Image (cartoon, rainbow, N blue to C red):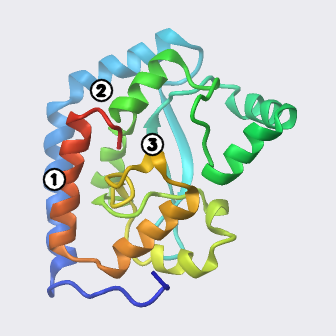
Amino acid sequence: MNGSAPVLPAPGYDLVKRGFDLLVAVTLLAALAPLLLMIGLAVRLESQGPALFRQRRQGVGAGSFMALKFRTMHVDAEARLEHMLAADPELRLEYERHHKLRDDPRVTRLGSFLRRSSLDELPQLWNVLVGDMSLVGPRPYIPRELAPYAWAGTTIARVKPGITGLWQVSGRHRTTFEDRIRFDVAYVEAYSPWQDLTILWRTVVVVIKADGV
C-alpha cells in the first residue's frame, strides 16, 4: 500500500465494468422505485428538510461530483457538530480519528435505521447510472479529507469511487480513518475483475447480516 501503480486488469475490463454498472443501476432503480419513493416520503415526514442529501465528493482523476444519499441527519447537523466538538474534547478526538461519531446525536431515528441497513446509499445508483461512480470502488471522499494524505489521494483517484468497496466489507465499524484509506489504496493496487466480484459477494453477505455497507 505505497501508492504504486495499480495492477492492470484484462484489456477492456473498464468497458465491461461500465456496462455491468449500467445494467445493474437501471435494473435496481426500476425495481426499487416504489421503495425509493417511500423512503423519501418517510424522511420528509420525520424531520424538516429535503429527502436527499447532496455533497461534493472526489471523483476519478481531478474531478468531483455531487454524491446523493437519503438525508439521515437533521438539517442543522453542521452547527450541531461544531457545538458538540467544542464542548467535548473526547468527542472531538473520536471525530478527528474516524471522521464520524459512533453515537451521533445529529442522526435522526429513521436515519439511524437507514444507515444500519445501507438503504441511505440507494440514491447513489443514480451516480452510477450517470457515470460518476461505480458499483465497486474506493469510497467517495470529501476533497478536504484527502488533503493530509497526498500519498494516497493520487492512487485512489485513479479509479471511480464506488457504492461498496474493500473497506466496507472489512469490518468498517472497527477501523480508523487511516485504515479506510489503506483499504482503498489496496483496492486500487489490486484492481481486477476477480476482486470486484469478491467484494460484491461479500457486500451481499454483509447486508444480509445487517452489518452495514
| Disc 1, SS | helix
Dot 2 amino acid type: Leu
Tag of residue 201: 1
Q: What's the CA distance linking mark 2 and mark 3?
A: 13 Å
Decide: few, some or many residues near mark 2? Use Cα within 10 Å; few <14, some 14-19, many ≥20. Answer: some
Whole-angstrom CA distance, mark 2 to mark 1, is 23 Å
Q: Which mark is residue 36?
A: 2
Task: Tell me which residue sits at (15%, 82%) in the image.
Answer: 12
For the residue marked with disc 3, what is the amino acid? Leu
**Of label 2 and label 3, which has the lower sequence position?**
2
- Seen in the picture, residue 72 relative to 130 is either above or below; the reply is above
In the picture of the structure, the residue carrying the numbered disc 3 is 68
Above or below residue 164? Residue 188 is below
**Front-most of residues 129 and 185:** 185
Total numbered labels? 3
Which label sits on residue 32? none
**Nearer-N-terminus badge (3/1):** 3
